[in-house]
Amino acid sequence: MIRIGLAPFTAAWFGDAGCDVVRLVKEGLAPFCSFLEKHGEVTQSEVITDERAALKAADEFISRSVDVAIVAVPAWSEDGPIVAFVRSMKDVPVWIVDMQSYCNMPQDVLKQDVFFAHTEVVGLLEANAAIRRSCSRKVDLLRWHDSPSDEPDDLANALRAFSAIRAMQGARIGLLEGRTESIKCCAVDELALSKFLGCTLDHLSLDELASAASGVTDKACGAYIDSMQSVIRTPAPTLRSEAATESARLAIALEGMCKARKLDALAFDDLSVRLHERFGLRPCLICRSILSHFPPISWEGDVVAAASMLLLEKISGPPTGVFEPFFLHRDGKSVLFGHAGGCDSRLGQPGESVIETDLEYARSQDRFPGSPSVMVTGAAGTVTMLNLRIDACGGKGMILRGEALPHKRALPGYSEVLVQFANAKTVIQQCLAGDLHQHFVLCRSDVYGVLRALFERLSFPCSLIDHREGKA
């Protein structure tokens, strides 16, 4: 939970004029305080009317280690205290909030106290101008409204983004056993990963996996397979095989390794020649709804994709998945995304998740060629997608909001989701223009605005594609 400092301001001369504006400001802030308390631990200063109180509030916020300080000007204030407060907050991010109370003129506006307590539009304009002209540091201006809306406001998105960034600090990403040799664009700079997302990389070996798998009994594998059949539509013979038992054994072993190492996400090189030589398959029978300690997992050793999955789950919760754009639909608007290697069944249409043969390895020299794999057809509804790149220079990426469409499965042996945008070609063109790779992380929630706010907080440039706006 993040720590939020709230500093409300108003002018001292209201009191000198005999107006009880401070009381009205406190009362008017109640809904805003309730909103903030849903997002973090709030420390609220007294209503600030002079520089002494401003410096006192700044000292208190710093001593309490607030993560962000919010300047609220619900009534006209004076420049000096606001500028003094902002300058005193040192490295703590400062936001000024536009509460938009000026959108509704009070009925009893002719009462002097009430009129002065509703002069936000004047106070906000003056405070914002004073900060911009007097302070060299960055101060964000964010909107908030105390009314239901289909679209979250700036402040809600920023707070969720800030919480996600905070939650990522110290996250442990496992890498087993390395980046896929033939996919160099999935390489990761560990120092950059730590610097920009706060994550550390934990290297795992196939020897560890073999040791963990040796402790998983056939009985445990059978119980896991039985549980899978209760949640995933499965042809019985598919799971009554040695291949299914060994794949289940590795899935259970991987969960145990992740739990023991306290991993928050896992990047798995499922194309490793050594993996297939040693185990005779890639473990694609991973059902996270059953293996409750299994973190988000990306394939092909893509660490940034694994971190992106974790980031999305910090914002929206599971499930997430990694997909690649396979085909542009003939309608010119939709992209068929897919990926081999297993997928979280919770991403699928109800009753449409299946366990099928892993076609990519059906003709391989594996001991268990074409072993069983969890495949999904993406459920319909709004989805958010993220394609993120991180290197020593910083981060860049693409954020997409699209509409997953119900459709008949087109690619047996692969998981897939059909996503509609305004223009399908734009997705590919923007990806090429940004030097981004083929891995898109998807979640079944609308967190487009939160990701935009997050990229702004991290100063990452990004391309934006939103089907609602009808343009990139």
Image (cartoon, helix red, strand yellow):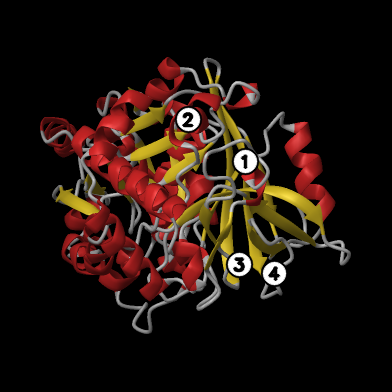
Say if residue 76 shows up in the picture: yes
Mark 4 or mark 2, which is nearer to you? 2
Q: On the picture, is 81 further left or further right than 138? A: left
Q: Amino acid at mark 4?
A: Arg
Q: Amino acid at mark 1?
A: His
Query: Can you identify the residue that label 3 sits on?
Result: 377
Query: Alpha carbon of mark 2 to alpha carbon of mark 3: how far?
Result: 27 Å
Judging depth in this view, the residue of 392 and 131 nearest the camera is 392
Mark found first going from the N terminus, 2 or 1: 2
Mark found first going from the N terminus, 1 or 3: 3
Q: Amino acid at mark 2?
A: Leu
Q: Is residue 362 above or below residue 402?
A: above
Q: Amino acid at mark 3?
A: Thr
Q: Residues within 10 Å of mark 4 (few under 14, many from 20)?
A: some
Mark found first going from the N terminus, 3 or 4: 3
Q: Which mark is residue 275?
A: 2
Q: Which mark is residue 233?
A: none
Query: Can you identify the residue that label 4 sits on?
Result: 409
Q: Which mark is residue 439?
A: 1
Circle 3: element type: loop
Query: Alpha carbon of mark 4 to alpha carbon of mark 2: how far?
Result: 30 Å
Q: Residues within 10 Å of mark 1 (few under 14, many from 20)?
A: many
Mark found first going from the N terminus, 2 or 3: 2
